[in-house]
């Protein structure tokens, strides 16, 4: 068993709205990532994937508030730290973050090298410009990005190139955990592949120790990450290895999600896509029992009556459903 | 469903679009021929910058055609002047990538849908009739009209907005619907709902859907005919089954190779 790089215990965060109504966007999430492993987070829009990313890196600016739980990065508890301390001591070296629209995050008036200087000078104010340039040049070379990019402005780069540059910038300090929030969703398939290859390279060469990859593209997750975690309404509903999750989903929601996979392979046309009816619950007043009960076709009255515990299986797999594993398999088989 | 039986809908011969002049000339769409038949879903697949959107704008009549001719229902298309253009737009409608910017923020959803009814000549119908039409359109896309009245578009989620866009199309009933990456900003689950609705439009009201996408998996799932576009040219076209499962052009093979798969190994070394 490898060294645990990131451990999260029962993390709860909320958004406080203007009307003093709280939205519990991340509600009791626990996870663990070992060195050299990657975890994929899947789920519908609005299920709390991006909020989880922000919470993990300690980005607690209003309206997002920290409630309870621990975030331990390589043995160091960073939960409850002030945002300013987080920026100075955690971001970049411990946790790096690639936001959803990373390519629009580049200031158009600055050259790429200035961003890298900014990042490094927060952590090491004494480093000379030449050293920064050399470091950046070396890193860009390894990652297959041309050196000229450093002297260019963001507008001169194509979308895929911008995205790869942003990844290179945010991992320049070799962080322990990289959180990538939909890094390839806005790109076409070829650029997407380049981005994925680059992230793989970063992992293989040891520049990042572990990775959390957030996306709603399940075929992509299956190919990129070791484990997959499915979120629904702020909670984890199922967690397991990528293979198990795609080919043998247990939770009805995961099964529904897997029904929406489209790949250009023979026989896919004949399988009708199965959309999950209904909409996710309002997180201002989360339902008491299973949050998926309203949309689940196997739901019984008990489902919405009581808190559903997470069931842990011996092989490390987890799911949150009242049905036992055997019962679930039986039900799926009878369909 | 042979080609001979289906009526001709949109046909292009040597359609070209050139931007700029002299040395700075860019040929965005380069002498393409196509033949779209009624009641089919046609996908145009290509990477960013391959000219898909330029072609779609020409089909919509938003930009002029530099060379070549587009035929609409067998006749050369004539859209010179505003009146003829408006007449043409009764036959062709579009949904775009970004549902958030497709609506007028100051108009409530009722008025969005009422506009469509008025445009189809239902202006003098009593309100009950209109209400019935609107409810019908909303239930076509699995939305409750009662929950939507008195709401502004920004109060809906992206998937709901895109579905409302399809409800509009259902009310307008154009001959052709041009869908320019309608699902690329929506999560995978709502995406399958949208795709199913496009299929329903084809099956129930025999609409021709031109589906523009960069995702060859989507194209394979939804379309009858596929056109693969590279640098402003069609490199391959044919029935979806043929084109995507047994591709001939190297470009098509590469596109298919770049999509993450589930049942086959995804080869990252080719980048």
Image: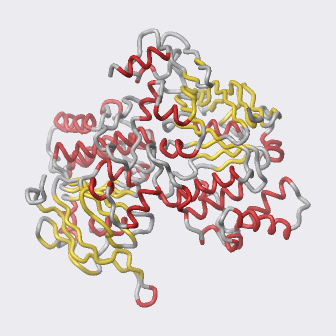
Q: Nearer the viewer, residue A82 or B196?
A: B196
* Residue B66 sits above or below residue A130 on the image: below
* Residue A265 sits above or below residue A254 on the image: below
* Residue A159 sits above or below residue A21 on the image: below
Residue A303, percent from left and from top = 47, 13
Residue drawn at the location 68% of the way across and 24% of the way down? A10
Residue drawn at the location 33% of the way across and 35% of the way down? B149
Image quadrant of residue A297? top left
In the picture as drawn, the residue positioned furthest to the right comes out as: A126
Asked if residue A88 lies left or right of residue A319, the reply is right
Q: Nearer the viewer, residue B20 or A227?
A: A227
Name the quarter where the C terminus of chain B is drawn: bottom right
Q: How many labels does the image show?
A: 0
The image's colour scheme reads secondary structure
Residue A334, percent from left and from top = 33, 19
* Residue B261 sits above or below residue A150 on the image: above
In the picture as drawn, the residue positioned furthest to the left comes out as: B5
Residue B189, percent from left and from top = 42, 38
Residue drawn at the location 53% of the way across and 22% of the way down? A285
Residue drawn at the location 72% of the way across and 48% of the way down? A96
Residue A175, percent from left and from top = 76, 48
Image quadrant of residue B161? top left
Q: Nearer the viewer, residue B50 or A284?
A: B50
Image quadrant of residue A145? bottom right
| Residue B177 in sight | no
| Residue A304 in sight | yes
């Amino acid at each position: 068993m490898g060294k645990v790089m990131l451990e999260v215990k029962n993390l709860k965060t909320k958004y406080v709205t203007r009307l003093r109504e709280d939205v519990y966007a991340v509600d009791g999430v626990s996870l663990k990532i070992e060195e050299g492993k990657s975890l994929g987070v899947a789920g519908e829009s609005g299920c709390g994937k991006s909020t989880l990313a922000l919470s993990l890196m300690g980005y607690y600016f209003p309206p997002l508030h920290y409630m309870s739980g621990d975030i331990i990065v390589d043995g160091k508890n960073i939960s409850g730290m002030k945002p300013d301390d987080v920026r100075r001591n955690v971001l970049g070296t411990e946790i790096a973050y690639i936001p959803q629209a990373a390519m629009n995050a580049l200031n158009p008036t600055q050259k790429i090298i200035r961003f890298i200087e900014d990042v490094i000078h927060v952590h090491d104010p004494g480093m000379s410009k030449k050293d920064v340039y050399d470091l950046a040049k070396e890193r860009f070379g390894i990652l297959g990005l041309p050196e000229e990019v450093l002297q260019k402005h963001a507008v001169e780069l194509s979308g895929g190139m911008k995205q790869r540059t942003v990844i290179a910038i945010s991992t320049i300090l070799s962080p322990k955990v990289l959180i990538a929030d939909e890094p390839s969703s806005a790109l076409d398939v070829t650029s997407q592949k380049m981005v994925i290859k680059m992230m793989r390279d970063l992992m293989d060469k040891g520049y990042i120790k572990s990775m959390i990859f957030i996306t709603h593209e399940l075929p992509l997750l299956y190919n990129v990450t070791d484990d997959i975690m499915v979120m629904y309404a702020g909670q984890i509903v199922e967690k397991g290895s990528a293979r198990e999750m795609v080919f043998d989903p247990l939770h009805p929601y995961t099964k529904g999600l897997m029904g929406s996979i489209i790949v250009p392979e023979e026989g896919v046309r004949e399988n009708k896509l199965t959309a999950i009816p209904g909409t996710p619950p309002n997180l201002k007043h989360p339902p008491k029992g299973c949050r998926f009960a309203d949309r689940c076709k196997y739901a019984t009255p008990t489902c919405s009556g009581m808190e559903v515990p997470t069931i842990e299986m011996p092989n490390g797999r987890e799911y949150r459903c009242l049905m036992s594993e055997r019962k679930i398999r039986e039900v799926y088989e009878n369909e | 469903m042979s080609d001979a039986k289906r009526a001709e809908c949109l046909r292009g011969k040597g359609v070209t679009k050139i931007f700029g002049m002299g040395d700075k000339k860019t040929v965005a769409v380069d002498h393409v021929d196509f033949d779209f038949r009624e009641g089919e879903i046609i996908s145009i697949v290509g990477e960013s910058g391959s000219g898909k959107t330029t072609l779609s704008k020409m089909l919509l009549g938003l930009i002029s055609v530099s060379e070549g001719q587009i035929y609409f229902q067998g006749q050369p298309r004539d859209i010179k002047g505003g009146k003829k253009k408006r007449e043409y737009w009764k036959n062709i409608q579009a949904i775009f990538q970004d549902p958030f910017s497709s609506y007028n923020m100051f108009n409530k959803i009722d008025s969005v849908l009422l506009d469509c009814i008025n445009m189809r000549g239902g202006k003098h119908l009593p309100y009950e009739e209109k209400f019935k039409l609107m409810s019908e359109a909303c239930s076509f896309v699995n939305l409750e009209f009662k929950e939507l009245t008195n709401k502004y578009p920004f109060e809906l989620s992206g998937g709901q907005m895109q579905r409302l866009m399809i409800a509009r199309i259902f009310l307008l009933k154009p001959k052709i619907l041009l869908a320019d990456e309608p699902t690329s900003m929506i999560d995978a689950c709502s995406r399958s709902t949208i795709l199913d609705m496009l299929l329903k439009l084809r099956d129930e009201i025999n609409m021709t859907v031109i589906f523009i996408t960069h995702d060859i998996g989507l194209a394979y799932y939804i379309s009858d005919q596929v056109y693969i576009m590279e640098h402003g040219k069609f490199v391959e076209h044919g029935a979806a089954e043929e084109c995507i499962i047994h591709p001939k052009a190297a470009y098509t093979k590469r596109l298919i190779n770049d999509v993450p798969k589930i049942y086959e190994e995804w080869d990252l070394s080719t980048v």
